[in-house]
Image (cartoon, helix red, strand yellow):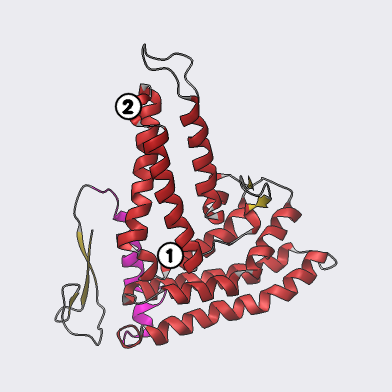
Amino acid sequence: MKPNAQSKAGAPDNAKFLAMADRFVKESLALSPVNASQAGYHKHVDAKTGKTIMLDAELDDVGDAGMAAQLAFYRDWRRRFQTETPVASLNAQDAADYRLIDDQVALNLLELEHIQNYKHNPTVYVELLGSGLFLPMTQDYAPKDVRTGDVISRIGQIPRFIEQAKSQLVDADPIFVSTAIGENQGNLDMVDGLVSDVPADSPLKTQYDKVAPPAKKALSDFNDWMTKKFGISYTSIDAEARGPSSNFFRQFEAVKRGFTGPNHTRRMGVWPINMNIPKSAIYDKKNFTVKLQT
């Protein structure tokens, strides 16, 4: 969002909107350090405290306080944009940027206030964590030892992150449980694999040796917890039919990748999955088919 060199007559550039938009983008990224890493935003200065936060060393706060902070943030920024820089006061380019921001705010509020996928889908946490471990080691924002230290810092926060995830999840479809368990094994592998990037005589090795065991235990326990909590429907599926190399898993991943675009409805079936649950809108018991729809 850059200031325009030329403005339409009667619609001067709104410097306040540009400043607010810049601050909104940076603060929204700071709410999710993993997404900030993905966006290439690595260091954030808190406007209230002046404290510099190294975002690549942090994992998201997905507990009640973190979710409440996100909800308050998006509600407050929507109010501020509407009252301090109404779209009618902006030139054409800034008005377009305003609408993009307002759409993004609306999407986040829809999730936080109504859909609340984070309460029903454990892959939200498993995939966020996987990205958090993977991204620093594949970017060049700092020397390798710094990036390795960032990953080790995030590994140290895994037990807290997993406990917060457990506190949020109230139910989960067997498909999501199956996917999350398969993907979570990848997170365990990444924690194990990092040791090869840590020199044996480095202080980082001491730090890694301290944080890796409780992190791996938390990840393994999370798989056990999901299986027990969301239970019979998932465990009644034969292991060969639900594991990462299964036909079901491959089909589900393919279907999930194909579910794109907001303006159409798609219906797909994944089979054969023999689950010990009654026939329902999402499960065809006769044909052993899980039905997916967007």
Q: Is residue 38 in view from this perspective?
A: no
- For marks 2 and 1 on the same chain, the one whose residue lies earlier in the sequence: 2
Position of 177 relative to 18 (above/below): below
In the structure shown, which secondary structural element does the residue marked by tag 1 occupy?
Answer: helix
Q: Is residue 50 left or right of residue 257?
A: right
Which stretch did the figure color magenta? Answer: 235-262
Looking at the picture, tell me which residue is in the foreground, 198 or 96.
Answer: 96
* Three-letter amino acid code at the position of disc 2: Ala
The residue at the far top in this view is 9
Q: Is residue 78 left or right of residue 48?
A: left
In the rendered image, which residue does mark 1 sit on?
Answer: 124
Q: Principal SS element in the magenta part?
A: helix
The residue at the far right in this view is 201
Q: Is residue 280 left or right of residue 20?
A: left
In percent of width and height, residue 149 lies at 72, 60
Question: Residue placed at 59% from the left, 45% from the top?
Answer: 41
In percent of width and height, residue 89 lies at 36, 25
Position of 140 relative to 166 (above/below): above
Q: Is residue 103 in view from this perspective?
A: yes
* Three-letter amino acid code at the position of disc 1: Val
In percent of width and height, residue 229 lies at 39, 85
Question: Residue placed at 53% from the left, 76% from the top?
Answer: 163
**Residues packed near mark 2 inside 10 Å, few (<14), some (14 to 19) or many (20 plus):** few
Question: Residue placed at 46% from the left, 76% from the top?
Answer: 167
In percent of width and height, residue 87 lies at 34, 30
In the structure shown, which secondary structural element does the residue marked by tag 2 occupy?
Answer: helix
In the rendered image, which residue does mark 2 sit on?
Answer: 88
Residue depth check, mark 2 versus mark 1: number of the one nearer the observer: 2
> Do the numbered discs 2 and 1 sit on residues whose CB atoms are within 8 Å?
no
Looking at the rendered image, the quarter that the C terminus falls into is bottom left
